[in-house]
Image (cartoon, rainbow, N blue to C red):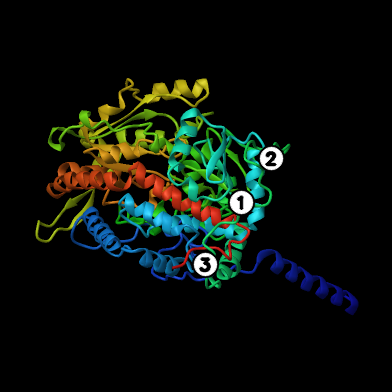
Amino acid sequence: MRPRQYYLLGVLAFLGICFYSLSHFKPVVRQQPSKDSTRPPSWTSHGGHDSESVPPRTDPIPVKEGSHPIWQLITKEEKELETLKARQSRTLAQAVAEYKRRYGIPPPPNFDKWYEFAQSRNVQLIDEFDTIHELLTPFWGLQPATIRSRAKEALGFNNALLGVQIRSGKVTNIAGGGEWQREATQGMMKQFLQYLPDMDLCFNTHDEPRVIVPHEDMAKLVEKARAVNMPAANAVEQPRNSFTSHPKGLNDGRAFEETKLTRFNVFAHQPTWTHSRMSCPPDSPARAVEEGERADDVAKYGLGELGFIYNETAMSDICYTPSLSETYGFFDRPNAFNVVHDLFPIFSQSKISSFADIIYPSPWYWYQKVAYDETKDMDWSHKKDLLYWRGSTTGGFSRNGGWRRQHRQRFVHKINAIEQAQVLVNQGDDQTPNYQPKTVPRADYKKIMDVYFSHVGQCDPGDCDAQREFFDIKPMVDQQDAWAYKYLLDIDGNAFSGRFYAFLKSRSLVYKFAVFREWHFEWLKPWVHYIPLSIQGNEWLEAVRFFAEETLGKREAERLAMQGREWANKVLRNDDLEVWFFRLLLEYGRVIDDDREKIGFSL
């Protein structure tokens, strides 16, 4: 071969290596460290994942020897809640200082009015609003005019939204949604409207969330917010305690201006995992390119061989659990999937972990669409020792046998199956317990289960018929019949379940099977107010058996049921929903203000 040919081959090889390197490697976007190093990773998935690619650990973390894992989790979570309650601010000055410590910026204008409003309603956790900060942080990465423009764009097209226009402290126009939702949404705001700036608000009328921003775009927004715009707001020594009057681009508030195009796309009754997982970090299990590599990182949230939930935040993070693509109705064929991939200010009642909807207290709860009738409840000792649930085959639309991949159907089938399961048995004694797994027939514990469908829907005719044949469909019942049972199951449907608050306010112990997240994340605690259940389900039987049969479990079941009831009556009142909503809208009002770096509250 001639020297010139060797030279050309060498050049081609070098260029090939360069091309490979550029196409396979990219710079890492580094997040700014939190102001408070004691806080857990962000639950909104903007920065809570490992910064380096680490293979998922498919086995739960080991449990400490000795007492039952459930007892260990109860003890741990109750201690943490008591610590949390003890450190709440007692004065406005303390609340302002705590706000600045957590978020590195001053509180929004009218924070003193909000604090007075919250105190007058005896709010239990006056400082616990990290969720709001995390939800709105990405919007600090956009220009305020851009956010207002996107709200205007969304409301100008038929995008399944309820629109609210606020001008001069009053609702001047409200349109879209059902009558009850309009009444409830406006009713939730009426006590504090006078403190809000002029704004247009977009409320999602679908159960399902709407905003899926690719992770790379979200990382840029959060980086700009934390590195540039929020520090600028913190640099002002004496912020102005008022919002800007008459923001640019807002009309007189009498009608929504029509737009001809929409960035929302509808994928109803279609598989949606591919769209959803793009909101996850590139190195997360959900983004694995080979299907065989999509293993759940169970160690992030599962404890012991059965996988009891020790971290509900991680458990409900879809980025850690790619098996959801084949086990959850929302990702199989959602009933209505109408989404946008740019960051739009859409207020939704619940959302998926890595979605970018702004969650707010559900008007469904405020309006008491599923009410708790205390006169029909009964003392614990009179209730049946059973896990109880009745409901419909909602959660997804079933076509071509898809119901076998949907979460409600999987739960009902597994909990009633005749296959083997594992429980924990004490191989020690009361003084030195030693709980070890034992394989047993599920049929041996059928006496503590009463979980059945009472309606089949959201399916093609053939799939509906197949489900009626496969499942033991029970007659429809009154919701108030649930109070006859000690253990109540609450499970996601098309999105969040609207029964949760009624269940918590009852004298029964609530089991929660959920991926969708709601506003109350920081105010309700697993293993203190309810029992969380995993997606995989290896611990489901033992989570019921422990409370129904163990001496310690029986005692704890009643105590936890009453404890959850007492707490729900303190933190899930309409007053509490309004306080949280007030705080959210003040924060949102600031982030869409052209002078957001100059305004705020200070003493």
What residue sits right under mark 3 in the picture? 51
| Horizontal relation, residue 466 to residue 74: left or right | right
**Quarter of the image with the C terminus in it:** bottom left
Q: Secondary structure at mark 3?
A: loop
Are there few (<14), some (14-19), or many (20+) residues within 10 Å of tag 3? some
Earlier-in-chain disc, 1 versus 2: 2
Amino acid beneath label 3: Ser
| Horizontal relation, residue 143 to residue 432: left or right | right
Are there few (<14), some (14-19), or many (20+) residues within 10 Å of tag 2? some
Are there few (<14), some (14-19), or many (20+) residues within 10 Å of tag 1? many
Q: Residue at x 27, y 44 (%)?
A: 569
What residue sits right under mark 2 in the picture? 262
- Camera-nearest label, 1 or 3: 1
Q: Secondary structure at mark 2?
A: loop
What residue sits right under mark 1 in the picture? 343
| Horizontal relation, residue 72 to residue 301: left or right | left
| Horizontal relation, residue 227 to residue 442: left or right | right
**Position of residue 185 measured from the top left corner of the image (x, y, whole percent):** 47, 38
- Distance between the Cα atoms at labels 1 and 3? 23 Å
- Distance between the Cα atoms at labels 2 and 3? 35 Å
**Position of residue 170 measured from the top left corner of the image (x, y, whole percent):** 53, 42
**One can see residue 531 in this view:** yes
